[in-house]
Every structure is written in C-alpha cells, then in structure tokens.
C-alpha cells in the first residue's frame, strides 16, 4: 500500500503538512486552486537557479501569503529586495488577492530535501554524468548530512538504449508503509538527447511522531519537578 500512493499525500496531517492552507466555497475553490498552481509554476520557472524546494500558500480573506523555501534565497530576494517587489507585482496579475505578502526562507540542508536532490541529479544527467555516479553521489551526501535512509531512481532511455528501463539505488532504511515515518519525496525531469529521463528521490529522516511524544513527555516531567 505504502509503495502505491504518494509518500507525502499518504502522510498528510501526520508527518507532512499541506502546501495550500485555505478554505473556500465551491464557487471559488476551482479558481483559487488554479491560482495556486499558476503561482507555483511561475516561481519554479522564474527562479530555477535559486533551487526552489517548496512554495507554501496561505489565504485569509483578501490576503495572500506566499512562503518560498529556496537553497539560494538571495536570487529570489534580489539586491535590496528589488526582486521580491517585482515578484509581488507579477503575482497581483495572477492572483485575485488584494494584498500579497512574500516570505523567503533558506533551506539549511539541501542534501536532505528530496526535490532539490532530484533536481541536482537531473542537472548532472543533462551534463552527461552517468546516472549511477549521479545517484551514488546524492546518496553519499544525504547519508553524511544525517539521513536515516535514501532511495533514488532514474527511468527512461538510460544511456541511449532503445528500451526504457528503471534503475535505483538505496542506502539505509525506507519504511514506506509506516505512517509515522518522516519521508520526503521529490521528482525532476532531465532533458537529454535521447529523450526525457524521470528522477525520483525518497529521503527518510526518522520517525517524527515519536520525537513529538518525547517532547511532550519531557515537558510533563519538567512541570512535575516544579
């Protein structure tokens, strides 16, 4: 079961959070959903060099808050915030919100972000680095950064062969059927002269629920001591 569904969607509300946080009636829902998709696509395309890990969108009335997680936030912010101002003006044309707030945060450890790892592998494939070398390099970096497990997969006409196939490498654990497992998942596409190669990355960071329980227990123990 865990291998047949989206690893993030499978754990929403448990170890993963929603990327869009708002409520709307049936008449507005479709329009706002398409706005979110357009905003994310625009930011991903325009700031590809910044290494966009995620775009979180929150709505409250006529206010729109966009939180951008990037490996290189300086590219999104620009000199003295000029790029953010330009982005704000562009989003006003995409969104129906009257007020737009943009926050840009840095991804502290990009080696543990599945989307950024997948994009890095795809970039190496486009530069004609062998798929095995690209995947093993990503696995080594993630494990050194503290990952409990990582799985990488490349599919397509690997090496220019006639028949498409999939190859994957894994290190550590990957409990895909465990709901409390904090598993990040990301995909990317590499454009090569032989066609498109698909890249998938799973990164296991530990059991988040157990860590929450430990935090609660420690707080209770401190209160009892007082």
Image (cartoon, rainbow, N blue to C red):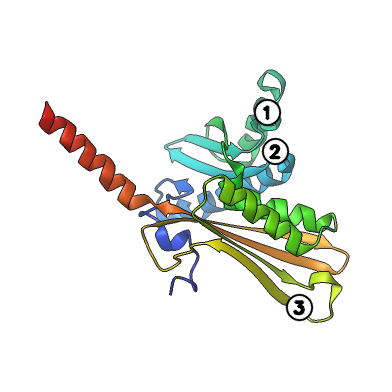
Distance (Cα) linking label 3 and label 1? 39 Å
Q: Residue at x 45, y 40 (%)?
A: 59
Q: Residue at x 70, y 54 (%)?
A: 137
Residue assigned mark 2 = 50
Q: Nearer the viewer, residue 182 or 189?
A: 182
Answer with left or right where residue 118 lies relative to residue 7: right
**Vertical placement of 128 versus 226: above or below?**
below
Residue assigned mark 1 = 74
Q: Position of residue 179 (x, y in %)?
A: 37, 62
Q: Nearer the viewer, residue 91 or 157?
A: 157
Distance (Cα) linking label 3 and label 2? 31 Å
Distance (Cα) linking label 1 and label 2? 8 Å
Task: Kindly state the secondary structure of the residue where label 2 is placed.
Answer: helix
Circles 1 and 2 in contact, beta carbons < 8 Å: yes
Residue assigned mark 3 = 164
- Mark 2 or mark 3, which is nearer the start of the sequence? 2
């Amino acid at each position: 079961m865990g291998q047949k569904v989206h690893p993030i969607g499978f754990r929403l509300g448990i170890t993963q959070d929603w990327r869009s946080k708002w409520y709307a009636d049936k008449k507005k829902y479709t329009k706002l959903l398409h706005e979110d998709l357009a905003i994310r696509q625009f930011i991903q395309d325009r700031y590809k060099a910044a290494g966009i890990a995620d775009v979180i969108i929150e709505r409250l009335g006529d206010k729109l808050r966009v939180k951008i997680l990037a490996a290189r936030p300086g590219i999104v912010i620009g000199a003295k915030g000029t790029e953010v101002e330009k982005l704000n003006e562009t989003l006003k044309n995409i969104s129906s919100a009257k007020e737009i707030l943009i926050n840009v945060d840095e991804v502290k450890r990009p080696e543990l972000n599945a989307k950024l790892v997948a994009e890095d592998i795809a970039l190496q494939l486009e530069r004609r680095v062998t798929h095995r070398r690209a995947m093993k390099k990503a696995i080594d970096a993630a494990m050194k950064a503290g990952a409990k497990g990582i799985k990488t997969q490349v599919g397509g006409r690997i090496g220019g062969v006639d028949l498409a196939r999939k190859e994957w490498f894994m290190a550590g654990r990957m409990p895909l059927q465990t709901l409390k497992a904090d598993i990040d998942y990301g995909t990317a596409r590499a454009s090569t002269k032989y066609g498109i190669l698909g890249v998938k990355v799973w990164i296991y960071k530990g059991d988040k629920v157990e860590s929450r329980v430990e935090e609660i227990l420690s707080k209770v123990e401190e209160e009892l001591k007082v």
